[in-house]
Amino acid sequence: MYVGELLKSLDRVSTGVPGLDDLIGGGFIPGRVYLIVGPPGSGKTTFGIQFLIEGAKNEEKGLFISLLEHPKIITQDMLRYNFGLLTHLKSKRILFYDMGESIFGAGRRFTWSEIFENILRIIEAEGVKRVVIDSFTSLEYSVLDPEHKRMALGRFIRKLHERGVTCLIVAEMMSSENYTEDYYLTDGVIVLHHFMRNYQMVRALQVLKMHGVAHDSNLKKLRFTEEGLRVYPEAPF
Ligand SMILES: Nc1ncnc2c1ncn2[C@@H]1O[C@H](COP(=O)(O)OP(=O)(O)OP(=O)(O)O)[C@@H](O)[C@H]1O
Ligand SMILES: [Mg+2]
């Protein structure tokens, strides 16, 4: 392996979430795979779209693989923000792929490997640089071979690394006694939290792990704004 290749780990791509890059040494390391996890309504899908918008602004083609919601519904919801999503959809810098339709409408079940191979085929065919898979958790209950997840996911992540694709895997929150393989196999984990305090909903973001990056794992204040999610350097309360 060349030194130039190794030093690539110093490069960064912006996450697209204002305030977050500063917490993780300037952004995501390109070509790595990250897990975005959180409870319902915590901002996981919004995060994913912001990540693709940021790429599209820099001429990087992005792919949103939807496993649950219809892309039309996601687009409708995201058009509320001042992202300029429509422009990027028209210019095809952001593509949606309704994988839920092909998986759940196929009349048969698929293995983890089949699903990952399918995703890799689309990535290759479209030449995308940023990928969001939302939500991974729905696959856990629909694959033919749940016991093969660790091996198939490990292989999938290696292939993404080889292709230099920066990927966000969105997953639903599990209790800490039930950390799934994604927590261990990905290069970084960002947790979106919400909880009640004095009858108020408090939102927060936590960088749970980030390989190769010195970072602060404390909870940081998170807000929804007209421009989507924004992270603040202070504690949420
Ligand atoms: N301006 C806002 N202020 C406060 N909360 C907001 C605002 N805009 C959106 N939300 C909240 O964010 C949620 C949508 O965020 P998003 O769809 O990104 O969450 P998610 O984590 O993907 O949710 P799910 O688990 O249902 O897929 C809304 O349902 C709403 O609760
Ligand atoms: Mg969502």
Image: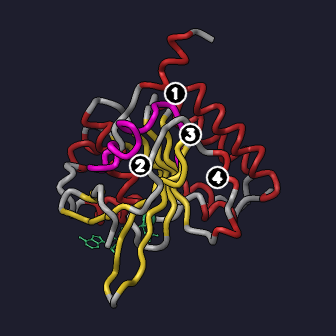
Q: Which residue is mark 1?
A: 164
Instruction: Name the quadrant where ligand 2 sits.
Output: bottom left
- As drawn, is 25 to the left or to the right of 154? left
Q: Are marks 4 and 2 in contact (CB under 8 Å)?
A: no
In the image, residue 160 lies at what x, y percent?
58, 33
Closest to the observer: 172 or 121? Answer: 172
**Disc assigned to residue 182:** 4
| Quarter assignment of residue 180 | bottom right
Q: Check contact, mark 2 vs mark 3: CB within 8 A.
A: no
Residue at mark 3 to residue at mark 4: CA–CA distance = 14 Å
Q: CA distance from mark 2 to mark 3?
A: 29 Å
Residue 178 quadrant:
bottom right
Q: Label 1 crowding class (10 Å Cα cut-off): few <14, some 14-19, many 20+?
A: some
Labels 4, 2: front one = 4
Segment tinted magenta in the rendering: 16-34
Location of mark 3 (residue) = 211
> Of the residues shown, which amino acid type is indicated by label 2?
Phe
Magenta region includes residue 52: no
Q: Looking at the figure, which quarter contains the C terminus?
A: bottom left
